[in-house]
Amino acid sequence: MNLNIQSVLTALAPILFAAVGYLITSFNELESRIQKTEGYLMLLVTPQGEIVASPANSIERQKLREEFMHIIHDLQVRIKLLEAKNEK
């Protein structure tokens, strides 16, 4: 069996070109995904490493804060009433 290297390379050339094209495309897609991820990361973390709250998250936190303030105020009123009742 006499293999001619020229004919083997000629047969493998399209496969090699397709593989190189696939690798280049994959690397470009990966680079694009990394750039998008870094962009999103810059929106969520400051350069000092502090986490930035998203607008939806800060709205929910504000609602919870207001609810807790009402609960705390209610508890303070109840404590004052109990203290006043015990002083009598």
Image (cartoon, rainbow, N blue to C red):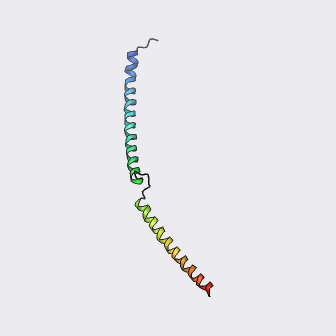
Q: Residue at 39% x, 20% y: name it.
A: 9
Closest to the observer: 18 or 24?
Answer: 24
Closest to the observer: 76 or 68?
Answer: 76
Closest to the observer: 49 or 23?
Answer: 49
Residue placed furthest toward the bottom:
88
Q: Position of residue 80 (x, y in %)?
A: 56, 81
Q: Quadrant of residue 44?
A: bottom left
47 over 70 or under it: above or below = above
Number of numbered callouts drawn: 0
Q: Residue at 37% x, 26% y: name it.
A: 14
Q: Quadrant of the C terminus?
A: bottom right
Q: Quadrant of residue 10?
A: top left
25 over 16 or under it: above or below = below
The reply, left or right, for residue 84 in relation to residue 64 is right
Q: Residue at 39% x, 26% y: name it.
A: 16
Q: Position of residue 40 (x, y in %)?
A: 39, 51
Q: Position of residue 36 (x, y in %)?
A: 38, 47
Q: Position of residue 59 (x, y in %)?
A: 43, 65
Residue placed furthest toward the top:
2
